[in-house]
Amino acid sequence: MNSCGMERKCAVEQKANHKPMTFTDRMRIAFRWVLDPVGAFLNRLGLVPNTLTLIGLAGNTAGAALLSQGKIVWGGLVILLMGPIDALDGTMARLRGEPTEFGAFVDSVTDRYSELVILGGLLFYYLHQGDALASTLVYLAAAGSVLVSYVKARAEGLGFEAKIGILTRLERYLVLVPGLLFNQPLLAISIIAVFANITALQRILHVRRQAHDQHKM
């Protein structure tokens, strides 16, 4: 993933704008010592970043298919394996010296697809089981996840910043995957259902403050 185009560019821009780095940004920088050599190796193999992005989407879709069949732990393992791929596409683009706006756009869109496909797999499973409560929680988790991303995109389109929040995509991933691996998907989904929507609200209020301050100027 590469929301700022390049990790280094991201850090420089945030410093210049006096904005604190997000947890996701810090994790990208912390693991560069691993990601850079792997990304360089993949570049030498002739792979392109967008290919890796699509491989990640295909892998997450396979994991979602396992979840839809009730194979929770196996689905979690597949989704876990796709995690590094999700980080490597941006690293490869940076090392090639060709991060593009379209590449970042494709990356962001496939991230949304991956997350919704995974939650869709769980929703299919719980609907098939006739579990109304679990199905509702998955729906709320999906709605919150979409709103977190939408609020950020809409805010940035209007010239505001909205990267704050307690449960961005990386945090949601770090909640969901352990829940799947330990066969406790409902616990993870419940946390996401609550805190993803809280995160969306945090961002809405953050944009409201910026708009209010701008109006006062």
Image (cartoon, rainbow, N blue to C red):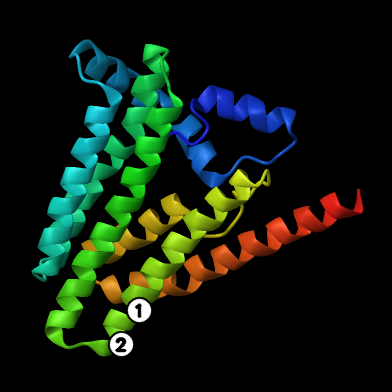
In x, y percent, where is residue 39? 30, 21
**In the depicted structure, whether residue 194 falls above or below residue 196:** below
Residue under circle 2? 133
Q: Position of residue 8 (x, y in %)?
A: 55, 23
How far from the left and from the top, in percent, is residue 185? Answer: 27, 71
- The percent coordinates of residue 45 (x first, y second) are 18, 14
Residue found 68% across the figure and 47% down from its top? 160
Q: Is residue 151 left or right of residue 64?
A: right
State the image quarter where residue 94 is shown: top left
Q: Residue furthest right?
A: 217
Quadrant housing residue 101: top left
For the question of whether residue 126 can be seen, the reply is yes
Relative to 28, does residue 145 appear above or below in the rendering?
below
> Element at badge 2?
helix
Residue at point 64%, 24% (across, down): 12
Per the image, label 1 sits on a secondary structure element best described as helix
- Residue that badge 1 annotates: 137
Q: Which quarter of the rendered picture does the N terminus lie within?
A: top left
Are circles 2 and 1 on residues that touch, CB within 8 Å?
A: yes
